[in-house]
Image (tube, rainbow, N blue to C red):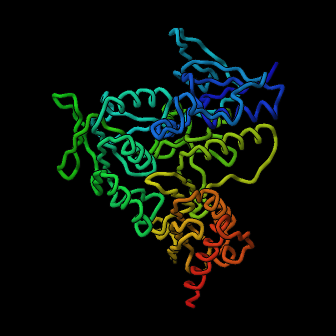
Amino acid sequence: MTKKIHIIGASFSGLACAEKLAQLLPDTQIILIDKDQSPDYIPNGLNEHLRGNINRLSQAMWQEIPSSKAKNIVRLHAEVIKIDPKKKELLLKRDDQDIILESYQLLVCAMGSEARSNFIKGSDRDGVITTKSYLDSRDALTKIEDSQRIVVVGAGVIGLDFAYSLAQKGKKVTLVEAANDINFHQFDNDMIAPIRTKIDQKGISLVTNTRVTEIIENLDESLSIHTDCGQSYTGDIVMLAVNFRPNSSLLENIVDCHLDRTIKVDSVMKTSDPNIYAIGDLIALKHSIINFPYYSPLISHAIRTGQYLAYHLAGIGLPKLEMTKLSGSFNFDYYQSSAGLTEEEGSLYHQLISYCYKEKLSKDGSLIWIKLIAKKENGQLVGCQIISECNNLLLTNYVSQAITLKQKDSDLAFHDFIFLKGEGELVYHLHEAAVNLFEKRISL
């Protein structure tokens, strides 16, 4: 009997797992199930379209890896309605509404996440848009083109990206954030001033410290958001740019879950059911700094967990997978990237010391801001934040490795680097930032 592995979800984690399994286990049949015709759509595709970087949303697909061309991968376009772990069966609904049963031997759950809010009443109204899937983005694009006033709820990475894109298209944008500053999960408030300045220059109305409680429809079909401060803001449409939540409802009462509805898994992604694994946005990995599960629904997390599980199922052992928390974006004319914890978040667990570095680049005179954060007792790196007009994403990846390896400020300061004035000087500025942090810590 041919061994089969069923995977629910053909987005980044499911596809990465399927492709790697097909390579490692050529005699195993991989059944890849998804109800979406375009599951490998990149959620930021609508931004790319609004900014003119692509002409069609269909170009925003994960094209770097051929999509399931392996002979032992079978695509099944259907919605999984129910998982029966006792019978080891899946109840599926096809496009023609036919209901079929599919038996499984080993099941990999990769249903991803969804943009939703459990706290905002009326967030499911027709004029409230999200952009996670291809169909959602296509619907959102039509509504955006027909609208002039747009309220964006959430000023994290997603909200900032869209506020910038919409302002570039000449839309009147109101940006509402529950926290006391923008993008607080990735940046401390002593780093965010350049972005706030650009937000003002773009004419965006920014409202912070304000939680949206309800979205209502007005007589003219516009939408108004009501807040916990008693204020209301009106737009033609509302964009919900809140954090993604695990799409784990299929597994409720089947496997053990955390309070945030992520699935509890062991070091090899196995759930409390020995025949069911979970990967991608369904799970949280242990954070390398604070040593407990941390939810970070990003594409890199999805790909890594999917490929990691494939190696395990093929009998290839790897060190236990952890995460550092990495983020990178471009909006308001700046590249913004971060690794590890912010100083505000990290101070909940450790006594910290930080240094904010600011300097001009010799090539064009533009500014770069670097913040490094370390444990005060020994200099172990905890976090890094970088803002610049030039692309700094690789630099933050570099610091992420240092954080993962538990290196200290002195290690980063005196690690060898290439210096080429005007071309490769970003790493020199990182070196200088690390030197300054080291000297501050030892009180020089």
Relative depth, front residue between 125 and 121? 125
Q: Is residue 258 above or below residue 22?
A: below
Please provide percent x and percent y for residue 302: 61, 42
Q: Quadrant of the C terminus?
A: bottom right
Percent position of residue 147, x then y: 30, 33
Residue 148 percent location from the top left of the image: 29, 36
**Residue beneath the point at 71% across and 26% down:** 68
- Residue 403: image quadrant is bottom right
Nearer to me, 269 or 57:
57
Residue 161 image point, x, y percent = 44, 47
Residue positioned 78% across, 30% down in the render: 22
Q: Is residue 63 visible?
A: yes
Residue 58 occupies quadrant: top right
Does 4 sit left or right of 297 as displayed? right
Task: Identify the residue at horizontal 32%, vertical 49% (top origin).
Answer: 175
Please state the total of marks drawn on the protein image: 0
**In the drawing, does residue 155 fall left or right of residue 421?**
left
Residue 241 appears anywhere in the view? no
- Image quadrant of residue 87? top right
Nearer to the camera, 436 or 419: 419
* Residue placed furthest toward the front: 364
Tell me: residue 265, above or below residue 23: below
**Location of residue 38 with respect to 260 vertically, above or below:** above
Q: Quadrant of the N terminus?
A: top right
Asked whether, in this view, residue 223 is left or right of residue 419, the answer is left
